[in-house]
Image: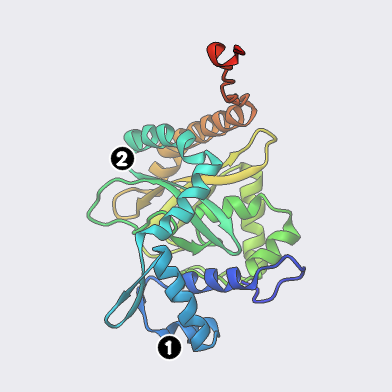
Amino acid sequence: MPREGTGPDFIEALARGLEVITAFRPRQPVMTLTDVAGATGLARPTARRILLTLAELGYVRQQDNGFALTPRVLDLGVAYTRSMGLWDVARPHLEWLVERTNESCSIAQLDGSDIVYVARVSVPKVVALVVQIGTRFPALPTSLGKVLLAALPPEEAARVVAEPGRSGLDPVWRPERAEWEAELREVRARGWAMTDEQLARGIRSVAAPLRDGSGRVIASVNVNAHAAETPADVLVNDHLPLLLQAAGEISLDFARLETAPHTVRRPETRLPNRASSVRT
């Protein structure tokens, strides 16, 4: 996140506040003032004022040994998802897909070189990929990410892949540029993507794009399985056709949502009281 903006309307204090929120990591849920100042590069007095402000607003709570985020931070991400209307549109289709595949299904969007999960319907299993709304993974070794990267012009995809990720995860697959470019070309040609233990051992998935009314890819949806339970041919031959059907229906519903007329309710006009309008 840039500390200094490029225009006169940039609010540095807001940027610093968001930087403090994103400084908290999955393996470091509680941070001291020194931790926050070190992670953000802010002076301790500045970091302290921001943390106390966030605490007063309910986004941070103070603990004996430092500060921790509160569940209210999720409101920021939920507001984004609700503003898109994507979850309301996708939920029945994801539930239908989960019921027929008995596998967990997710929707993600691209944020830099990472994917961020914005919707998910999971199936309880002994061995499962731990994912929740807001989880980040490197885009390139995931089926969701391959679909999103393949939707970009090649040069833009190369620029995005070169950006440092923020997921904190080291994937199994670390391809050279020529290899991943060939992979994305194949994804563009066939319209879907697969990963087989490229993100982590034992995890395989297939993904398809979600499009808006103009045909632009706005997200991707996948079926995720464990390699010990679901062979790759079952994923491709049985689950993929269902996934493509669900992706098409979600895209169609989202296009309908975009073009649906929005009714604006006008405030009621109160008529003057007849009795009070009579002059005496």
Q: Quadrant of the C terminus?
A: top right
- Depth check: 23 or 223 in front? 23
Q: Amino acid at mark 1?
A: Thr
Q: Which residue is mark 1?
A: 34
Q: Residues within 10 Å of mark 2 (few under 14, many from 20)?
A: some
- Depth check: 66 or 196 in front? 66
Image: 32 above or below 102: below
Q: Which residue is mark 2?
A: 102
Q: Is residue 208 visible?
A: no
- Depth check: 194 or 87 in front? 87
Q: Residues within 10 Å of mark 1 (few under 14, many from 20)?
A: some
Q: How far from the left and from the top, in percent, is residue 74?
A: 41, 56
How is the structure coloured here? rainbow
Q: Are the residues tagged 2 and 1 within 8 Å (C-beta)? A: no
Residue at the spot 51% in from the left edge and 62% down from the top edge: 141
Give the number of the disc on residue 169.
Answer: none
Q: How far from the left and from the top, in percent, is residue 254?
A: 57, 33
Q: Secondary structure at mark 2?
A: loop
Q: Is residue 236 left or right of residue 61?
A: right
Direction front: furthest residue: 280
- Depth check: 43 or 168 in front? 43
Q: Is residue 236 visible?
A: yes
Q: Quadrant of the N terminus?
A: bottom right
Q: Amino acid at mark 2?
A: Asn
Q: Is residue 55 left or right of residue 246?
A: left
Q: What number of labels is visible?
A: 2
Distance from disc 2 to disc 1, alpha carbons, whole Å, reads 46 Å
Image: 181 above or below 23: above
Residue at the spot 63% in from the left edge and 37% down from the top edge: 212
Q: Nearer the viewer, mark 2 or mark 1?
A: 1
Residue at the spot 29% in from the left edge and 83% down from the top edge: 65
Closer to the chain start, of discs 2 and 1, is 1
